[in-house]
Image (tube, rainbow, N blue to C red):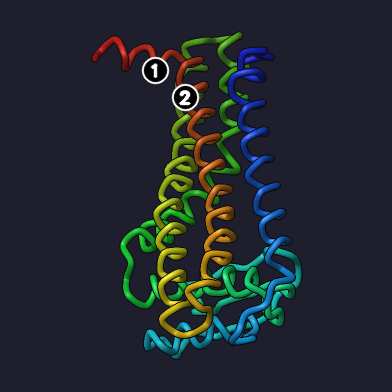
């Protein structure tokens, strides 16, 4: 579809700024509480294990992985993978992140519907996220040569990109719920005191902003492509 300054100014630049600010806030908040300990003096791994056991989840493995903020829960093998700065650290940041990931394990154990939906979307998203941009670019080129063929290709590209957008939107309630579970369970299990949970909440809230920024940027990009293909105008006219 060629170079478009409006895309740069109205979609790409705001998306980059939003994502950059969210990422900076996560790093700053994590660093702030990375040196603050807790009365319980637990490591991130110990906190996650205790939180899960208190909720009756005993079949989840917890293991260390390399990297920083690479923490995640793998529902396929019921494994909680914590990054090195989280697994062995005894800080509020480490405990907040570890318990958040444990929240995903609780979601899995209790059949949380939004987690099921996100897991079902993973195979589709893996394909659509790789294919959408090449298909959209191919459609843009075809539009200049043969619009009758270019439009269907563009619409296919938009549909593929929309699948990735749906995944990013579905991720929001999954991440928010995991943090909410962690905030409650941390106090109930005695992992943090009511006074300490505020710091852990700050870490989790900052992390959620990265998912929110990603979803907003994806939606803005999809709306741009729908506008360029004329689909958005057609939908508005029908209304």
> In this view, which residue lies farthest toward the front?
195
The residue lying at 51 percent from left, 36 percent from top is 216
Residue under label 2: 223
Above-or-below relation of 35 to 125: below
Q: Quadrant of the N terminus?
A: top right
Q: Is 172 in front, or is 134? A: 172
Q: Is 154 in front, or is 4? A: 4
Q: Secondary structure at mark 1?
A: helix
Residue 104 in view:
no
The residue lying at 57 percent from left, 26 percent from top is 136
Residue under label 1: 232
Residue 195 image label: none
The residue lying at 71 percent from left, 68 percent from top is 34
Q: Residues within 10 Å of mark 1 (few under 14, many from 20)?
A: some
Q: Is 224 in front, or is 15? A: 15
Residues at badges 1 and 2 in contact (C-beta under 8 Å)? yes
Tell me the distance, in whole angstroms, between the alpha carbons under discs 1 and 2. 7 Å
Q: Residues within 10 Å of mark 2 (few under 14, many from 20)?
A: some
Q: Is 217 in front, or is 229? A: 217
Q: How many marks?
A: 2
Q: Where residue 67 sits in the image (x, y, percent)?
A: 75, 67
Q: Is residue 97 left or right of residue 186?
A: right
Mark found first going from the N terminus, 1 or 2: 2
Q: Secondary structure at mark 2?
A: helix
Q: Quadrant of the C terminus?
A: top left
Q: Where residue 28 sits in the image (x, y, percent)?
A: 71, 54
Q: Where residue 158 sits in the image (x, y, percent)?
A: 48, 29
Residue 133 in view:
yes
Q: Is residue 181 left or right of residue 83?
A: left
């Amino acid at each position: 579809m060629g170079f478009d300054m409006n895309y740069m100014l109205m979609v790409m630049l705001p998306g980059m700024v939003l994502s950059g600010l969210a990422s900076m806030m996560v790093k700053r908040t994590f660093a702030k509480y990375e040196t603050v300990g807790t009365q319980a003096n637990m490591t991130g791994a110990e906190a996650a294990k205790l939180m899960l056991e208190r909720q009756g989840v005993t079949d989840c493995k917890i293991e260390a992985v390399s990297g920083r903020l690479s923490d995640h829960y793998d529902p396929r093998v019921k494994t909680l993978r914590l990054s090195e700065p989280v697994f062995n650290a005894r800080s509020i940041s480490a405990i907040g992140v570890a318990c958040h990931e444990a929240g995903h394990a609780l979601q899995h154990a209790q059949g949380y519907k939004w987690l099921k939906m996100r897991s079902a979307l993973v195979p589709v998203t893996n394909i659509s996220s790789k294919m959408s941009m090449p298909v959209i670019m191919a459609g843009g080129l075809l539009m200049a040569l043969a619009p009758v063929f270019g439009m269907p290709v563009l619409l296919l590209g938009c549909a593929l990109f929309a699948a990735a957008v749906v995944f990013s939107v579905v991720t929001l309630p999954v991440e928010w719920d995991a943090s909410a579970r962690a905030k409650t369970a941390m106090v109930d299990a005695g992992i943090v005191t009511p006074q300490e949970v505020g710091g852990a909440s700050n870490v989790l809230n900052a992390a959620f902003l990265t998912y929110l920024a990603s979803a907003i940027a994806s939606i803005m990009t999809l709306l741009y492509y729908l506008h360029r293909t004329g689909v958005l105008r057609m939908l508005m006219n029908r209304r």
